[in-house]
Amino acid sequence: MPLYDTNSIKIYNTLSGEKEVFEPITKGHIGMYVCGPTVYSNVHLGNVRTFMSFDMIFRYFKHLGYKVRYVRNITDAGHLENDDDVGEDKITKKARLEAIEPMEIVQRYTVDFHNVLRTFNFLPPSIEPTATGHIIEQIELIQDIIDNGFAYIKNGSVYFDVHKYNTSNEYGILSKRKLEDLIHNTRTLDGQSDKINPQDFALWKKAEPSHIMRWPSPWSDGFPGWHLECTAMSTKYLGDFFDIHGGGMDLKFPHHECEIAQNKAAKGQDPVKYWMHANMLELNGSRMSKSTGNYINPAELLSGKNDIMSKGYSPSVIRFFMMQASYKSVLDLTDEGLQAAEKGFNRLMDAIELLDTLKTDNTSTFNVIEWKQKCYAAMNDDFNTPILIAHLFESVKFINQLKDGSATLSTDDLKILKETISVFVFEVLGLVNVKKEASGIDKLTGAVEILINLRKEARVNKDFALSDKIRDELLEAGIQLQDGKEGTTFTTN
RNA sequence: GGUGUCGUGGCCGAGUGGCUAGGCUUGGGUCUGCAAAACCUACUACAGCGGUUCGAAUCCGCUCGACACCUCCA
């Protein structure tokens, strides 16, 4: 019996504004689409957080035994920079500045993106389609929308008729906006626009002569509008109605709103059962912005080569830090917060390493079964990783009590404890025990044990000057000795 | 201006009608040659003002504040 039969997940659905019991459209299968990055610059750290949230969700679904098709696109066609006629494809603009081919930019930053995600121990999605690889699908989609009367052609460009759509549908259903409010608050654009109404959005844009990225279409040589690719790729790989669509909170409007409109206009139905939105990452209390300097990229955060943090942090510490907050909450990245996370993470890893050294007993003073169920309950409640981590620390305390001899555990329970910790810490949260990963750990252990024995001799001889020297200098080298009842052990930092 | 989310102890961050979140920091204790680590223990909060209720951090209203979106953005 798969685990998903006994674990009912609740998901906060942005569409309803409530937590709903998750029921996949097809039993045992999940289709999940997440809006991926635009590869015209190095991946943004906030982007990493969003994808990390969905990586964790993907991991948990898989653990429960679901067959998940996880689609995360690469936006390599660029979006319109402005929604007016002087709009320029982002990728083209950058390419011109650096005087290289657009696809060279795309390649460079796609590689960077993959490298960063690999560093943070992401699982690859099932399909990672590119916008430029789906121009034909996008053109077909536009034709469907035109045929159904929800789009108009003007000077070689095609626009979605939001006002007409709104007469038979509800534009704003996801972001809880009303078209009337949008009309009153839409900024008047400079210059002449082909749009009938400012709320309309482009499905196809005719390319200016200088525009490098262009494709032929029935309407003009041009390029697709910026909401279209996700509709084309999500429905191509997941069907016209699929389980989960995710992305950052800032994509809720207009991007996801437009996706719903496009799908209904083209196929006559809502595309998505559960909309999920990950919240933003801030830096020292305010949004990250390159222009104000309140900005740090993943490489800088990892290396410590920056003016904001006191040091670099390992990928797992950063991951642990992010998992300590709910994906739905704004998270503030601070040096202090990362340091606290690092200490907590190390404590967790130290306890996990103790698991292999524990002695078992006939009875248990810790209800492992109940604890395990609480871990699942936390995840089943809209992927509540902070609560899961709180439960994990409950086990940390217990493991340390076992080491001290103030608690007991049966052999069967130890097995469950080990398995459960492994599942949640490594499989679901995707953390990595960097200490174990470090090469040469066995040789190090041998060397440190020699020093531990030397120190033991010194202590027996009451040569505390020597014993303290060994201890203190090892600590400086990043190796901490721990004297326990059963002898001395060590941890590395 | 509009829409939305939110304001929790020294810091971070869950919870959401009565019952300990958790991490980090700090005080006391146990252990130790002294430490460290670990364990035990202490500090006990929900922006402000009203209202609903036997009871509210949790529901409702107002005020103040923060953030996001409305314009490329995860």
Image (spheres, coloured by chain):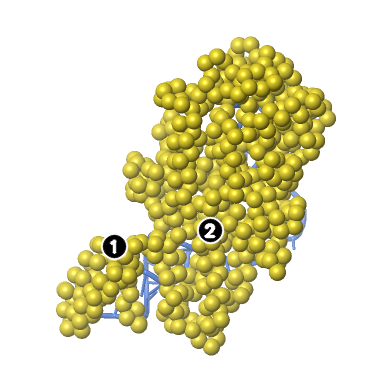
Q: Identify the hue of chain A.
A: yellow
Q: How far is disc 2 from disc 1 in space, using C-alphas?
A: 26 Å
Q: Secondary structure at mark 1?
A: loop
Q: Nearer the viewer, residue A239 or A345?
A: A239
Quadrant housing the N terminus of chain A: bottom right
Of all chains, the one bearing label 1 is A
Query: Which residue is pictured at 56% across the width and 81% down the height?
Result: A412
On the same chain: label 2 and label 1?
yes
The residue wearing badge 1 is A478
Quadrant housing the C terminus of chain A: bottom left
Q: Quadrant of residue A79?
A: top right
Observer able to see residue A382: no
Query: Which residue is pictured at 68% across the width and 33% down the height?
Result: A137
Query: Can you tell which mark lies on residue A147?
Result: none
Is residue A109 toward the left or the right of residue B50 in the image? Answer: left
Chain letter tied to blue: B
